Image (cartoon, rainbow, N blue to C red):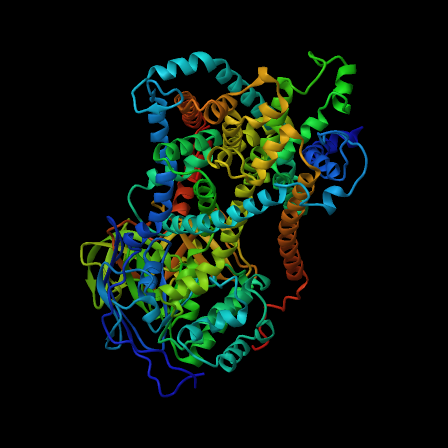
Amino acid sequence: MVDAARTVQDLHLRNLTKKFGDFVAVDDLTLTIPAGSFFALLGASGCGKTTTLRMVAGLEDPTDGTISIGDQDITRLRAFQRPVNTVFQSYALFPHLDIFENVAFGLRRRGVKDVKPTVERMLDLVELGSMARRKPSQLSGGQQQRVAVARALINQPDVLLLDEPLGALDLKLRRQMQIELKRIQVEVGTTFVHVTHDQEEAMTMADTVAVMNNGRIEQLGHPADIYETPRTVFVANFLGQSNLIVGRRAGSSGDSTLVEAHGQTYAVPSDRCFSSTSDVTVGVRPEKITVLDSVDADKVPDGNNRLNGRVTDVSYTGVSTQYLVEAPWGQELIVFEQNVVVGDRCEVGDQVVLHWAPSHTFGLDSAGGTNSGVDPDVVEAEKATARLLSDGAEA
Amino acid sequence: MVAVVPTPRAAAAPVAQRSSRTGYLLLFPGIAWLGIFFAIPFVTLFMTSLQQPVPGKSGSYMFGLQFSNYVTAMSEYWPLFVRSFIYAGIATLLALAIAYPLAYFIAFRAGNWRSLMLVLVIAPSFASFLLRTYAWKTILSDEGIITTTLNSLHLLPDDRILNTGIAVIAGLTYNFLPFMILPLYAALEKIDPRLIEAAGDLYASPQKAFRKVTWPLSLPGVVAGTLLTFIPAAGDYINAALLGSTGDRMIGNAIQINFIQFRDYPTASALSFVLMAAILALVFTYIRRAGTEDLV
Amino acid sequence: MRWLRRNLLGIVAIAVLVYLFVPIAVISVLSFNKPAGKYNLSWNEFSLDGWTNLCGVPGVCSSFVTSIQIGIISTIVATILGTMIAFALVRYRFRGRSTTNLLIFMPMATPEVVMGASLLALFLNLRFPLGQMTVIIAHIMFIISFVVVTVKARLQGMDPRLEEAARDLYADSRGVFRYVTFPLVLPGILGAALLGFSLSFDDFIISFFNAGTLVTFPIYIWGAAQRGIPVQVNALATIVFLVALGVVLTSQFVGYRRRRALERAPIAMDTMSRS
């Protein structure tokens, strides 16, 4: 399928801005998407990721900024003039045309005469050859999705845009399609730009992930990099979960920055500390923490960050056990422990010591609070539950 | 390998949003037609209603500002106005009572038969309106089953149905029934049946559930249906002419007879104008009270 | 007894449907009648005269043809004008939207007497001769609103993403309209045209006021109502009814068959055979 003679080029977004009245959907976005990569734009709904995608497709006009592929500025080109194709969220298959004509649509509009061999080959690639004469309404969700991909890819675009294409599929099918899309991308070599709010999906499929928030990119990088080393509270909360403890800078020791919080001192490697002020929020991922009974406190390795607490909740999920541990100052911390040793679990009420390696710690700017990036519904629910419980306790 | 993606050179014209100019061009012919042949005639109607007779030439009229035409027309024909609104009102209420069960059934119980039943609702409209009304002369005739049965039960004040107000109202109800059924159905069909289930889950009896859930949610359909029934019914004169006696004449009959037979254009126009104004007033107060969304 | 209570709603519903059809039955049955006197109001004896001699009575067939002619012309013009308005309303921005909506909505809410009367007043004042022209003008006027409403609904129900997909797939504005928008709106336009035709064909009041000496089919019937309606009229009306019913039922049936084909079509497993 790959045309060896064609070289795909990088996609450049420069100072891209989109305003709807007073509302800034995309705020001065500058980004280079490497040719041939699988790139994910990740963010909550309303963060501007879909608007960015639509601007690249030509379906939305930027208020400011430019879009170019290699040296070619496509900002002023209309959608049908751009070497870019889109797989829409709801597939947008033409209901009045059969599958064959849907897939052939782009070819026909460009004046290609004999579409039959190409279309048939494309349909075979997505294993829908037998469905060529059916109408979209006669296909299942997964099949429609494959038609949408085929319809876009057959035009060999420089960039393929995917707008949350897997959202409507059930879990198992989604997993399968994730693998399939990744495989197709590698085989075809086209640049894929995938927009999603599902962080697992982004991390699974993409070579590079850009986390978007309020029209800006919070952080960009390889999935493992941005997961292990988040640079803002938003990214720390939005990708997976984090424990965040607000503290104050307390000097340094070697290549570690020391942060003091609630009477404890934590070591953060200076190259993993992204706060420029004296307020530093210490962060650590739940799966990096080890739980020990208080009586075993002496078994904590030297140099590890530690804190004491009391277990308030134990959830067994099969693969792991999730603990909620209340720290002396009231904050609840989350810990994931893999169930490597069967039967060895703490119980509610146990006094425990949590510890983790400094290299797993990160330090963040405290501005914005510790809830940035958490689903607002979750925050509301937690507050409401806390209120209910405290009312109940009084009564 | 098949065709390569076209590589257009730079800067084509900037992408324009839907230009207003095309919009206006599309609108113009149709709106102009409506403006000329619907809106402007109201002006000429009003002007005609103020015309005064040409002195010396009876039957001819010329431009004037004779507002007294309204007074003369109304003083002679006001009973017909009252009668029209009463007949139309009763017919509308009857239509609502008859249509609601059918609409409800089609919306909630018909399942796969839904489309067929809707076709059956519209189908009678394919036969001539006049003939359908005329057919009621046969059905309600003095020797017919209905009249004789009701007579034997001593339910008829005049010993007959035809040539009474009852027949006119019956005809009005029948003729505009589909206009009541379809909006009702449209509104009922939008109601999520799980809402009614939820009401039951929260201790409402079927009657209570209807009163508190179904009926309020169907109100937009009720409003639309009653308007679409009442308005044409108030202006109708065919039912009155074919099924009623001279004592059952409605305002439509007066307008028709003044225009076509008497050629008393000022009177006829004045009556039309008053009818239009009355209906408009009724519609706007009704809508404001009931509150509807976009009607078009 | 309990059966009655449970099915009461269904019984009432069927009863209402029957009620709707009773006059139709009367019209059709009386088309096979040989009236005793002038008026075809009660059954006398069976006869096929009405059917075999359709154009026997002068005026019946000519008025029928007149109505068809007027219907076709009015429908075509009104459908074009109305469709244009619908597109403008749904796809374009312009000022004066509420006034436009009002102007479109008003004819549907105005009694026919008033519309017929005011148009007549206009023509009289302009000394415009009454006849086929004025009837067509009048019909176009009141059909436009119905076309707008029908086409607008169809247009609004269309997924806007479909046009975006077409643009994404190299269709310019003309291509988008020709290959996506128009085919998808067409059923709505056709439905509006059918509706318009039936409104025009059966219109009496507005036509009567503005026809002058022209006789359309409903005007003929009205005139005949005093003298006795010929059996042929019943026959013709029955034919029109059956044809219209046939058209609607056929389109319903076609849709039904299509849906059944969907259900029976084997849908392959979603899993792809390659690992």
Quarter of the image where the C terminus of chain C is located? bottom right
Q: Nearer the viewer, residue B137 or A206?
A: B137
Q: Nearer the viewer, residue C210 or A340?
A: C210
Q: Quadrant of residue C217?
A: top right
In this rendering, the answer to whether B251 lies above or below C264 is: above
Using residue A366 as the reference point, say whether residue B225 is left or right of it. Answer: right
In this rendering, the answer to whether A302 lies above or below A187 is: above
Q: Nearer the viewer, residue A245 or C211?
A: C211
Residue drawn at x 56%, y 75% is A127
Residue drawn at x 69%, y 19% is B161
Q: Quadrant of residue A220?
A: bottom left
Quarter of the image where the N terminus of chain C is located? top right
Using residue A320 as the reference point, say whether residue B170 is left or right of it. Answer: right
In this rendering, the answer to whether A197 lies above or below A31 is: above
In this rendering, the answer to whether C172 lies above or below B219 is: below
Q: Percent position (x, y) of residue C122?
A: 37, 33
| Residue ranking furthest to the front | B56
